[in-house]
Structures are given as C-alpha cells and as structure tokens.
Amino acid sequence: MRIVFMGTPEFAVPSLEALLRSDDQVVGVVSQPDRPKGRGHQLVAPPVRLVAERAGIPVLQPLKIRTPEFLQALSVWQPDLIAVAAYGRILHTPILRLPPMGCVNVHGSLLPKYRGAAPVQWSVINGETETGITTMLMDEGMDTGPMLLQESLEISPDDTAGTLAPRLAELGGRLLVDTITQLKAGTLMPKRQDDGQTTMAPLLKKEDGLIDWTMNATALANRVRGLSPWPGAYTFFGEERWNIWKAVSSSVGATTDKPGTIVAANKQAIVVATGKGLLDIREIQTANSKRMSVGQFLAGHRVASGEQLGSSAA
C-alpha cells in the first residue's frame, strides 16, 4: 500500500521506522514545522523529519493543515492509508476521507482512558500500574474513533513519563504494522469505544509543575514521576527555585506540621510535610546547577528543619 505518515516528536519515530521496514511504501511524511529551541532559539527540525530525510522520503511541514493547498499536496501522494502518531493536530474531514482505507492513529493509552495530548504523563501522575497502546480509525473527535488493536504495558513504581514513553513508542510501532497487516487482510473489526469509561489527558503547561504541598505524599510522588522530564516538578525555597526530579512517599510516620514544612534534612532525603504523610525528596536541581542527589545538594546548601517550601510569593 501507499502510506502517508504524520508525526512529529521522538514518540512517533518507532512507528515511522516500523513502516519503513514493512512491506508497504511510505510515499510521504507530514510533520510539524521546525521550532526554535535552546538559549539561542535556533530552529530545530522535529525527529520525524530527520528520520524521513535520511530515508529519502519527501516531507511536508505545513503551518496550517485546513487549507486547499495542503489537501492538494496530500492528494498528489495518492495514499491508500494515512498513519498518524503524535502529529499534534486534529485532522478534519477532507483529510480523513482522502485515503480509501482511512486514517489510523497510534495512541499512548488504553482507550477510552486518557484521551488527549498527554496520555503517558497523566497515566503516571494518576498512579496507574498499567497503560498501553491503542490503534484506532480516526474521526474528527479527540481520540474518539473506533478501536482496532490494543496491547497493555506495565508501569513500574520507578517509571517516569520519560522512561515509559520509549517503551510505549516501540510497542506502538509494532502494533501499527500489525494493524495495517490485518486491515489489508480484512480480518480486523473496528470496535466502538465505551464513552462512559472516558478519562482525559489534557496538554500539560509549565505552570502545572508547581507542587501543591496540600496534596498527599503518594499523589505528589506520582506527580513528580509523571512530570519528568517535562515540564518538571518544582517548588520554591524562599526565592530559590528547586526542581524536584525524584521523590517518594516517606516510610516515616505522619506529622502535624503545615504542608510544605521541612521536617528533616539528611544525606538520604529532605523530608517534607504534605497534606497527608511525608514526602522524601531524593534528587534536586537549582538554577545554573546540574541534577544531583540530596546528599550532594546539602553539601553546598544550608537547609534546616522547620523551614518552609512553597510558591515564590509565600
């Protein structure tokens, strides 16, 4: 078959690579435009574009996809099917109707749970022990189309969004090829999603990383894992911003201290009171420094029991 692939970030790369190894022909790739990155704000190409160019596949990077010009450019490729993985935009009806076999999406959750832009992060934030990949036929909704194949994957207690995403991405590539193989064979029956079981995974913003110390310790530990590597969990010690990279619910007993109060500080952890229970901060980073263990951090910073963590305005 002639396949057009639409995807942008690293998560989409294994799906494109799996298609390139398959019996079908990737005739074109669509990715988001290059974006400025780093302190120099230099334009950086998305990972999917780089893979496509190395394979000699033509690439489109439209600023807008709801235009006659873009639809015409897609039509020139004459796709039998469009495969989508983390492209970053919702496809409208003219694109969805273009390929005879439809548009197949690779989504990083067990739909209908975690529809939306950040399913990997929210599954960890919410303390799930299992997630997976769902392939589906796309409609104009937000991950609402009929499901094709689904496979689960364990979330370990030490997983972060950053460690979970590559495993899901590899599973997504394999499941995409399996899905297309079965669609060609006519052996795959789309299954309607149960909308009553829907949960959402909205796009995360930088400010979502600010720690609310009134939450319980387990929820905060999961939030730190789910926000790593981006946008990252953070709090303030006076005016100094602390990025928290690893934290666990403490095995030490409860406290009556105000949430955000530092209860103890030693080489193993900075122990902080929460809305319920204690949180052990294990890895930390401040401005213009590298990520380090609490033991390394305390060697150059004075932190005492009774001091308060919170927003910079507190």
Image: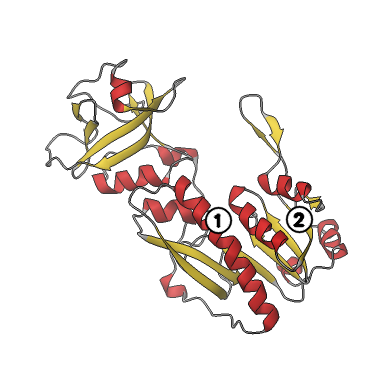
Residue 29, which numbered label? Answer: 2
Q: Percent from the top left, x then y, of residue 118?
A: 50, 53
Mark 2 is surrounded, within 10 Å at the Cα level, by few (under 14), some (14 to 19) or many (20 or more) other residues, namely many
246 with respect to 139 (left or right) = left
**Residue 313, above or below 26:** above
Q: Is residue 130 left or right of residue 107?
A: left
Kind of residue indicated by mark 2 = Val
Residue 212 can be seen in this image = no
Judge from the rendering whether residue 251 lies leftward or rightward of residue 80; answer left or right.
left
Mark nearest the camera among 2 and 1 is 1
Using the image, determine if residue 95 lies above or below residue 303.
below
**Residue 50 vertical placement versus 197 (above, below):** above
Quarter of the rendering occupied by the C terminus = top left
Residue 271 in sight here: yes
Q: Which residue is mark 1?
A: 169
Q: Secondary structure at mark 1?
A: helix
- In the rendered structure, find residue 81 and report the number of the disc placed on it: none
Towards the viewer: 129 or 311: 129
Return the x and y of residue 31 as percentages of the image width and height.
71, 51
